[in-house]
Image: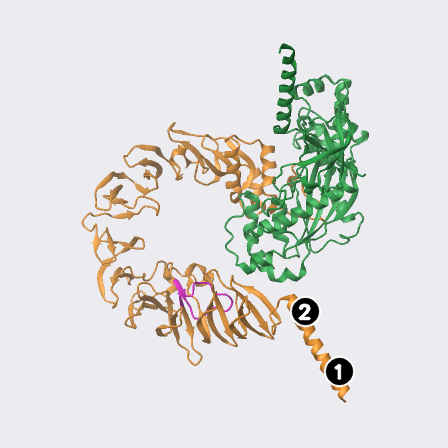
Amino acid sequence: MTHMKPYIFLLFLFLSLGIYAQTEEIPYRRSSLYSILVNNTASEYSEVIKAAFLTMPLPEKYNDHDLSVKVIDTDGTPFGIREDKENRRFTNFLKKNHVASRLVSKWFLRNPETGECSLQQIQERGLYNASTFEREMAQRSARSEALLMDAGEDLIGNTYVLVNSIESADKSAGAKIAGALLGIAGAVTSIATSNSGFGNLGKFSADELEKFQKFKVRINTFLYQLVWDDEAAGLFYKEVYSDKPDVEKQKYFEEIRDKFQLKYIGKVESKAGKTDFSGLQDPMDMVRKACKRALDENVVDLAHRFEFFRPKMPLLSTAPLKADIGLKEGLTPQSRYEVLEVVTDENGRRSYKRVGVVRPKADAIWDNRYMSVEENAANATLGATTFEKVRGGDFFPGMLIREINE
Amino acid sequence: MRKIFFCCFLSAVLAFGLCQLLQADDEIPVGYQEAKPWGNQLLKVRRGKSYGLLRKSGEVVLNADYSRISDLNCYGKAILQKGSKYGVISADGEILVPADYKALYDFIPANQLPKDSQLAAYGNARVSLAEFSTLDTLLTDAKYLRFKKMSSEVDYIIDDHANIILKDVSDIVSLPVNGMMRWWMNYSTFCAYGYYNIDSQQKTTVSSTFGDNPQNLKGMTDFSHGDFIGDIAPVRGDSSFFFVNKNGEKVKEGYDVQCNATEDIWVFRKDGQCEIVNSQGEALFADKGYADLHFPPADGDQSLMAAKSNGKWGVVTMDGQQVLPFKYDDAELLTNGLVRVASSGLWGVADLKGKTLVPCAYMDIEVGGDVAANACWVEPSDSLYHIFLIKEQKQLPTGYVYIYPFKEGYAWAQPNDSLYLNRSQAGDERYGAVVGVDGRTYFSTPLRYEDYPLVLDFIHKNGDKPLGSLEGRRLYLYMTRNQRSYRFENIIPEEEWDY
């Protein structure tokens, strides 16, 4: 019996780890997003779309890197919005308002009044051990440089801007339900600000609710990436970064904002399909759901097209293989995901090494789309998608998965 | 010939069918060119230049015979117009007043009349003047309206179902109250005024200002005559006030000035002493010899009033029992059992037991409803408002230009600082900060009062700790993001960015 004790202990340990892996949230590095709405004020729906955009949750697999400017008004559908090329108007807006420099500022929590910066955001999002990180940075060693390079590549360089032009796609229903939608516009503003829910907007007749069911949107999303190369990083760390108030550095940054840039990557257009509003009585929920689903669809499309934009997500468990993704991320039975092991070198720099490939089980794909539970969608309550191994070695919780084209 | 006829017939059928299909897709009922929601229940439809109302099912509620159907007002009433005739319709399509009248006139609150028509003589009445007809949207609940018949120059007063309640009105009149309507007839150098009794249809003149002391309505600096409270109403005569009954007969007289009024009572002074005249015409407190009376606010203790006796103010109950002694130069009842009291021209605060909470040392005092906050605002000689801590009996040094009362331990206040003053001058709104009863600034980013509740909510959720200036600015930008939108053509100012 004595010789059995180690095995019993190990069994207990593995079981415990398994339980731990299934119940603890596993932190992982995410790309960062700043999302802007281009709002056609000539549209009857402009106020409700704006309210829906400002109150809908951000894509979960990305860090919130929003800035305070969220809505840009236009007096009609922006020219060239449906063409599959860079929209110069959008690009010029981002450039002349120095959006790239502001995204960089946010990474370093830069105080615009004093120039003081902090690495706290980087430490938190980079999942660096707080005390170790502080110590390394203070020492300014090769290791600290390596950590910053790691952060630059994996975090700052994975900062994106989404410029979304949202339009109603159903003209035939427009005139008839505009009155009802405009009727709620007055209350929408305060609701969006207070985040307190829909509030008392009065009752809608069955006929009017039926008309909301026809609401459809088309979203054109333009993707930009923050350029964080050696030149940008060097400029910032040498000439701008200061962990104390520094008037000269504060002023200098204002002069060199245009040295930081965004790069246009590409654009996609949502399909303007019909959204299932069953289970919803609140017209604002319907509008929000239609917008969110379409926006999620665009994010998935962009991730399909641009590999570097694809999120990496952790395996929550290995027996069975499960991950916190689903239909919202565009999962299908034909999807293939590489399993990545995070490798950290002696200086703390991370890299990712493929150790296998998995695919979702056809009957176990989680429907995690926005408000799928309310519409009683099948598999809405699974909580995660179950995968099966296609090839590779042993997998462990905490390993990451990322979609591949195969 | 047959072929031509057949082709024409076929074309007509096809065209009709196509129209049906198109109209079915557009969901405009057949036979109309336009359909828009009207209220929550109906559609306003247009056929040619005429309008009507349909239910959503297509059932006709009002034939398209009207040249205009106005938007519904907040009372669910709208104007019907047929040519040059007017009527009133409700939100469910019921015609309240047929479109038979040459003009309709609302009873408009006196303070909403054009500036040069707002006269002190009207007091706070809702009046109907023949020169202000209602052409666009009804302003009131249309419970009473004045109208002019097609063939007449005199007006009638109707209720909201077109029942005539008063005929042959040629004066300025006020909204019926307790079965009586005030009237005025203004002339260049004098005026006359009185009442219409709706029940008896009798018109009485209670006063006129021709004679020894002529003046017209515009010359009056006080109200001319009041609405009836119960069976009596006050009237301003040539040299004094008097009360009349519904027949226009004097029932009490000799009052030299009005002190106060509520919905149920009038307070007048006679021979230097106040009387409360209730709706039965009874004079209360006539024996007490009070020279003046102040009543509590609507949310204050209605069993008390401040009274002046022998030149000093105190607080008494409504049945004459003394609560605070008559030792103050002035007294005003507040909520929460507090009293603003004055001595030597300076204000302080006392409780109903006479304990001084704030000494009488200030030009003004603002006490909020939140007594537990232990703080109020005081205005010393620097003309700025300062926080006064009641338990500590201490005035804090920082002064504010504009303040709101403390509530839940916080208040919105505008510091005497160019950051806030310049911002306020630039627009037409005031910008301030959030101040705690401890005198600390909890949110220093210039903040409109309208946004104050949201910031207060955040402060509470943040553990009731002050926010730094940058943190506050970023919070404010985040909270107001839905109110801010920008144009592609413009460069967004730096203060609109959080980074």
* Residue B394 colored in magenta in the image: no
Q: Residue furthest left?
A: B287
Residue B22 is marked as 2
Q: Residues within 10 Å of mark 1 (few under 14, many from 20)?
A: few
Q: Secondary structure at mark 2?
A: helix
Chain identifier, colour orange? B
Q: Which is more N-terminal, label 1 or label 2?
A: 1
Q: Say which residue appears at 77% left-offset and 35% top-offset.
A: A260
Where is residue A21 shown, x and y percent of the image? 64, 27
Under circle 1, the secondary element is helix
Give B65 or B144, whichever is nearer the viewer: B65
Spatial CA distance of label 2 from label 1 is: 22 Å
Q: CB atoms at circles 2 and 1 under 8 Å apart? A: no
Residue type highlighted by circle 1: Cys
Q: Which quadrant does the N terminus of chain A fall into?
A: top right
Q: Which residue is mark 1?
A: B7
Q: Mainly helix, strand or loop, the magenta region? A: loop
Question: Label 2 is found on which chain of the structure?
Answer: B
Tell me the residue at 81%/29% (across/down).
A230
Residue B388 seen by the camera: yes
Does residue B136 belong to the magenta stretch?
A: yes
In depth, the one of B292 and B92 nearer the eye is: B92
Question: Identity of the amino acid at label 2?
Answer: Leu
